[in-house]
C-alpha cells in the first residue's frame, strides 16, 4: 500500500465533520430535531458503554445512540441531551475491512442509522429499508 505512505488517518475532528455533513444533508423536516442531538466522536467506546452492552471487542461498535427516542419522550424523562457517539478506530477498521465504500459514506451511514434511533426506529425497522450491511 505505497499509496498510504506519509498519510495519516483522519482525526476525530475530520470524522466529526463527515458526520456533521450528513446531518446537514438530512431532509428539511428532520434537520430541526436532529440539531438537538449532541455528536461525540471518540477513538473507542468508553469501557462503561462496552460493559453495559456486553461487548468485549471495542472494534465491534462503530456508533451508538444514547437517549430516549422522540416517539417515547415525555415530560418525565431526564433533561440531558440525546447523544450520538461515533467511534473513529472502529469506523476505520470497518472501512478498511470492507474496502468497497468511501469513508465519508460509511461515517454518514452510521450517523444516519443512529439518528434513525433518535426518531424512534428500531434496528429491525431500519433493516427493512436499509440493506447496507448485507
Image: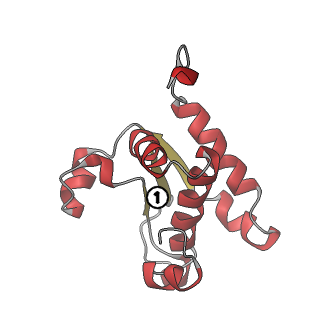
Instruction: From the viewer's side, name the closer residue of 36 and 49.
Output: 49
- Left of 20 or right of it: where is 132? left
In the image, residue 105 sits, relative to residue 115, either above or below, namely above
Q: Residue at x 55, y 30 (%)?
A: 10
- Residue picked out by circle 1: 80
Q: Residue furthest front?
A: 2
Q: x, y percentage for residue 15?
A: 57, 39
Residue at the extreme right of the image, as rendered: 28
- The reply to whether residue 74 is visible in this rendering is no
Report whether 51 appears left or right of 24: left
Image quadrant where residue 112 sits: bottom right
Whether residue 85 is visible, yes or no, is yes
Residue at 75% across, 54% down: 24
Neighbour tally class for label 1: few under 14, some 14-19, many 20 plus, Cα within 10 Å: few
Residue 25, image x, y percentages: 77, 58
Q: How is the image coloured?
A: secondary structure
User: Who's the residue at 49% across and 46% down the image?
Assistant: 95
Q: Between residue 27 and residue 78, name the one nearer to us.
A: 27
Residue 83 percent location from the top left of the image: 48, 56
**65 horizontally vs 51: left or right:** right
Q: How many marks?
A: 1
- Picture layout, residue 72 above or below residue 41: below
Q: Nearer the viewer, residue 79 or 111?
A: 111
Q: Measuring from the top left, give residue 46's x and y in whole percent.
A: 29, 44
Secondary structure of the residue carrying tag 1 is loop
Task: Left or right? Give the position of 104 relative to 1.
Answer: right
Amino acid at each position: 500500500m505505497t499509496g498510504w505512505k506519509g498519510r495519516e488517518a483522519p482525526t476525530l475532528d475530520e470524522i466529526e465533520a463527515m458526520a456533521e455533513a450528513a446531518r446537514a444533508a438530512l431532509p428539511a423536516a428532520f434537520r430541526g430535531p436532529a440539531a438537538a442531538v449532541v455528536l461525540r466522536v471518540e477513538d473507542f467506546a468508553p469501557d462503561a458503554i462496552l460493559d453495559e452492552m456486553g461487548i468485549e471487542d471495542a472494534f465491534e461498535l462503530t456508533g451508538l445512540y444514547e437517549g430516549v427516542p422522540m416517539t417515547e419522550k415525555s415530560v418525565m424523562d431526564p433533561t440531558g441531551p440525546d447523544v450520538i457517539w461515533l467511534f473513529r478506530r472502529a469506523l476505520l477498521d470497518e472501512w478498511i475491512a470492507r474496502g468497497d465504500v468511501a469513508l465519508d459514506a460509511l461515517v454518514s451511514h452510521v450517523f444516519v442509522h443512529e439518528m434513525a434511533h433518535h426518531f424512534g426506529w428500531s434496528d429491525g425497522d431500519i433493516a427493512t429499508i436499509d440493506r447496507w450491511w448485507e
